[in-house]
Image (cartoon, rainbow, N blue to C red):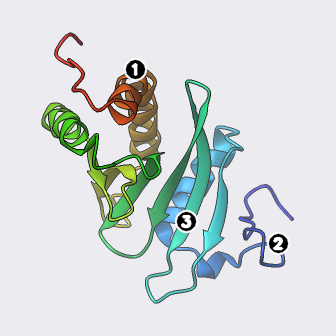
Amino acid sequence: MSETDILKFAGNDNKPAESNALNVKAQKWQELLVKKNITCFGAQIVGDELHTVLFRTILDVNGQNLPLLVYTDDSLYTVIKVLVAPAARKAENEAALLKYLDEQNRKYKLFKYSTGVSGDVELDCCLLNTDDGFDAELLQVSIDVILEHLLEEYPLLMKVVWSAEAVDTTTN
């Protein structure tokens, strides 16, 4: 197996992925990872009609391991998703948390926060690109910007999550 092969995740047989099963963006992202010796990503070929490949890693943010997914496929979109705080939205913190997330969403254009039905706080970044125009370096820079943001903001977010009272976030 060469260093450019993508392995399927556990639950599969860990055989190298067929290169024709990869979408163009996944191939370009994989090439950048190999070129820069970035080894923290695993990958999963979904096997759908869009040739989706999920790249997974963990962000170490202030001692917390936050799952990060990069979705690549044949569509115009490449999506970065970070699970920032699972089941964080509760009745007692909902108003303060949603206010904080709205403030963050107004500040940052590259990514947006949301909460799902289970109360998870997620951060999403959507990059628009064609196969020919896909820039793996831009994807890497976007992940770096997200990590830098989380290293700074995660403690404030968690204060809001763990407190029913609003936190003054205007001092940053």
Mark pair 1, 2: CA separation: 37 Å
123 to the left or right of 9? left
Name the residue carrying label 1: 152
Q: Position of residue 99 (x, y in %)?
A: 16, 37
Q: Give the residue at x 16% y 16%.
A: 170
Mark pair 2, 3: CA separation: 15 Å
The quarter of the displayed image where residue 59 is located: top right
Q: Say which amino acid is labelled 3.
A: Leu
Q: CB atoms at circles 1 and 2 under 8 Å apart?
A: no
Q: How many marks?
A: 3
Name the residue carrying label 3: 54
SS at circle 1: helix
Viewer-proximal residue among 3 and 108: 108
Q: Position of residue 33 (x, y in %)?
A: 62, 46
SS at circle 2: loop
Q: CB atoms at circles 1 and 3 under 8 Å apart?
A: no
The quarter of the displayed image where residue 64 is located: top right
Q: From what the image shows, is residue 110 above or below residue 119?
A: above
51 to the left or right of 153? right
Q: Earlier in the sequence, mark 2 or mark 3?
A: 2
Q: From what the image shows, is residue 37 above or below residue 160?
A: below
Name the residue carrying label 2: 14
Q: Earlier in the sequence, mark 1 or mark 2?
A: 2
Q: Residue furthest top?
A: 171
Q: Say which amino acid is labelled 2.
A: Asn
28 to the left or right of 8? left
Q: Say which amino acid is labelled 1.
A: Glu
Q: Give the residue at x 40% y 76%.
A: 74
Q: Position of residue 146 (x, y in %)?
A: 40, 35
Q: Earlier in the sequence, mark 1 or mark 3?
A: 3
Viewer-proximal residue among 14 and 82: 82
Quarter containing the C terminus:
top left
